[in-house]
Amino acid sequence: MLASGKSLAITEEEFKLLEEKLKPHIEKEKEMLEAVTKLMEEVEDDRIKKILIMIYEDELMHHPFMTNFLDLVIKRETITEQDIWGMLFRDLPTHGHVADPYVGKDYGP
């Protein structure tokens, strides 16, 4: 969707819900990195070690992606209440304020 120029904007509430869902996953990624690192030091079988290295390398790429995902992609597409008010009033001549009834009137002789 982003590549086609369409917005994936979400509300603050949706962002918070997504963040709640991703935080435990990010924590599991971190635990996995630690566990695989420990296993690689303990295992002596080269075949098992090779598999652990592959898992470790995959986690090394995946973990930073997950930790940055919210900020790099989703947070940028979140619509806040302030954004909505800005969209409503930004282009109005009075910018959301009550119009002054005396502005633009000629009260001279």
Image (cartoon, helix red, strand yellow):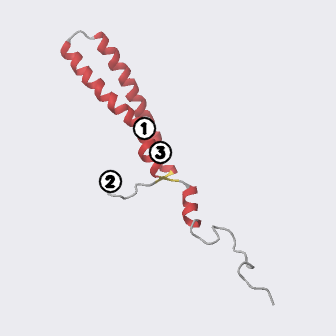
Residue type, label 1 = Asn
What amino acid is labelled 3 in the image? Leu
Residue type for callout 2? Ala
Disc 2: CA contacts within 10 A as few (<14), some (14-19) or many (>=20):
few
How packed mark 3 is, by other alpha carbons closer than 10 Å (few <14, some 14-19, many 20 or more), is few
At mark 3, the secondary structure is: helix
Q: Which of the two discs, 2 and 3, labels the residue nearer the N terminus?
A: 2
Give me the residue at 80% from left, 87% from top: 108
Q: Nearer the viewer, residue 53 or 26?
A: 53
Tags 2 and 3 touching, CB below 8 Å: no
Residues under numbered marks 2 and 1 in contact, where contact means CB atoms less than 8 Å apart: no
Up/down of 79 relative to 43, above or below: below
Q: Which residue is mark 2?
A: 3
Which residue is labeled 1 in the image?
68
Across and down, in percent, residue 64 comes to: 39, 33
Among the two numbered marks 1 and 3 on one chain, the one whose residue lies closer to the N terminus? 3
Q: Which of pointers 2 and 1 lies earlier in the amino acid sequence?
A: 2
Q: CA distance from mark 1 to mark 3?
A: 16 Å
Occupied quadrant, residue 81: bottom right
Name the secondary structure under disc 1: helix
Marks 2 and 3 sit apart, C-alpha to C-alpha, by: 24 Å
Q: Which mark is residue 17?
A: 3
Dots 1, 3 in contact, CB < 8 A = no
**Residue occupying the point 32% across, 20% down:** 36
Q: Residue at x 37, y 36 (%)?
A: 65
